[in-house]
Amino acid sequence: MVETNLILLGPPGAGKGTQAERLQADFGLAHISTGDMLRAQRAAGTDLGREAEKYMNAGELVPDEVILGMIGLRIAEQDAREGFLLDGFPRNTAQADALSKTLADSGRRLTAALLIDVPDQEVVRRLAGRRVCSKSGHVYHVEFDPPKREGVCDQDGSRLIQRDDDKEETILRRLEVYARQTSPLINYYEQAGLLRRFDGQRDPDEVHDHIRATVATLRLEDEL
Ligand code: AP5
């Protein structure tokens, strides 16, 4: 079977993590979120986590050398050899070039870059209301996708928390960083013939149906 290697692109709060959880279940791909990896390092109190925290809390990108080292190791792991879903990476053209090179060096390639489009004012609403399970990382929204019991995860009963970078001032900075550093990747992957666009303003189930149908078609085409 041909590997399916995907990138989820889109502004903060577009729904990348929400869709990644579903697509991972659909296609059995390794979900690789650089944000989650950095938060795990921070929670473990490692040097890398402490260094990354300064940038994350300011809404800035963590330096490329930190991210590239982490990603290079992760996509070479056994589960990711059978296909991966990158969430939050690449975030600038230097990271995208490094990814292409790493994949080409090992005879691998990207299947598609999936762009979830959402306007800035919607991002602010979404991130200000986001709550995350302190144990599993499952994502909720106080208005659009509330848990059955306020402040408690439906899946495992753990406490729901608000991310440190989901304060309005930091959200606005993250949007600026996305516009300046990450959005040029839309053209980058369009030029490479890999870009697929999705309307992220629809209901999460509808967004999921569209992405799933597109990925299923791409996998069929690859197998022909
Ligand atoms: P990261 O964790 O990657 O954050 P992000 O890209 O800003 O994305 P988010 O996780 O905030 O949003 P999402 O698109 O996953 O949305 P979600 O599904 O949660 O990065 C954090 C930081 O780490 C960066 O700022 C940077 O410092 C550092 N970093 C990470 N990767 C890096 C890299 N490669 N290089 C350098 N630095 C890096 O949904 C959001 C909310 O909306 C939820 O409440 C959800 O319930 C709700 N929602 C989702 N879909 C819908 C819908 N369709 N309708 C209504 N509500 C919805």
Image: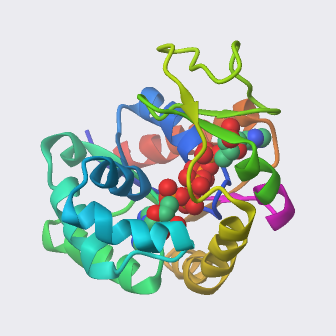
Ligand 1 location (quadrant): bottom right
Quadrant where the C terminus sits is top left
Residue 217 image position (x, y, % from top left): 53, 42
> Which quadrant holds the N terminus?
top left
Specify the quadrant of the image occupied by residue 184.
bottom right
Q: Is residue 170 above or below residue 128?
A: below
Residue 2 pos. (x, y %): 28, 45
Q: Which residues are magenta?
A: 113-123
Is residue 190 rendered to the left or right of residue 82?
right
The residue at the point 71 percent across, 30 percent down is 205
Q: Is residue 4 left or right of residue 26?
A: left
Give the percent coordinates (x, y) of residue 64.
33, 80
- Relative to 194, 10 lies left or right: right
**What is the residue that sits farthest to the right in this orientation?**
121
- Nearer the observer, 223 or 202: 202
Q: Is residue 77 above or below residue 151?
A: below
Q: Nearer the viewer, residue 183 or 153?
A: 153
The residue under the point 63% across, 37% down is: 131
User: In the image, is residue 143 above or below residue 9?
Assistant: above
Q: Is residue 127 left or right of residue 92?
A: right
Residue 31 highlighted magenta (yes or no): no
Residue at 14%, 48% in the rendered image: 77
Splitting the image into 4 quarters, where does residue 79 fall? top left
Quadrant of the image occupied by residue 219: top left
- Image coordinates of residue 173 in percent, x first then y, are 66, 76
Vertical relation: 209 (above or below) 126: above
